[in-house]
Amino acid sequence: MKTQFEQMMDGLNDIEAFLAGEQEGFKAHVPHNVDVKAIRNRLGMTQARFSDTFGFSLDAIKHWEGGRRTPEAPARTLLTVIDRNPAAVLTALDPAAFAAGPSKPNSAHVSVGRKRQTSRGVTRQRVSASGKRITKRKTLKP
């Protein structure tokens, strides 16, 4: 069994050989474990919204988060990209949604509806896709 240092040196030697033209292609390393729930929570999405946004089935999300199944390599790859650069995935999946408004190349604005209790009632705020704040007020009955 190789030490971590030897594994790193092997990787660096592969890069050197590739850059020198002695070796073609490369091998992508897909993580074995992906914390789907942590990724989804970081984006502030429900399971249903996460599955709709990124094209996963809702059952798959539930099974992955519940530990009953693990994502296959292609799904782990996509989940890793979603974790590191969700804007890239969103732009690739639905470019028209991001063409209308300004966006930062390495970030995505994903918002969650928030409730705020006031003396007059409950105020619900959310941010639309265009970036405008939408406020709805619900008056409590006395």
Image (cartoon, rainbow, N blue to C red):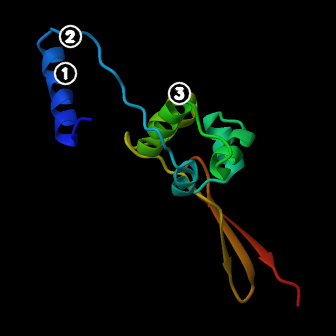
Cα distance, mark 3 to mark 1? 24 Å
Q: Secondary structure at mark 2?
A: loop
The type of residue carrying mark 1 is Asp
The quarter in which the C terminus is drawn is bottom right
Residue 15 or residue 133, whichever sits in front: 15
The type of residue carrying mark 3 is Pro
Picture coordinates of residue 41 (x, y %)? 56, 57
Cα distance, mark 3 to mark 2? 25 Å
Residue 41 bears which disc, if any? none
The residue that label 1 is drawn on is 14
The residue that label 2 is drawn on is 23
Residue 87 visible, this angle: no
In the rendered image, the residue lying farthest to the front is 1
Dividing the picture into quarters, in which one does residue 96 lie? top right
Residue 102 or residue 33, whichever sits in front: 33
Label 3 or label 1, whichever lies nearer to me, is 1
Picture coordinates of residue 136 (x, y %)? 73, 67
The residue that label 3 is drawn on is 74
In the rendered image, the residue lying farthest to the right is 142
Identify the residue shown where x is 53% and y is 55%.
38
Residue 105 visible, this angle: yes
The type of residue carrying mark 2 is Gln
Identify the residue shown where x is 68% and y is 45%.
68
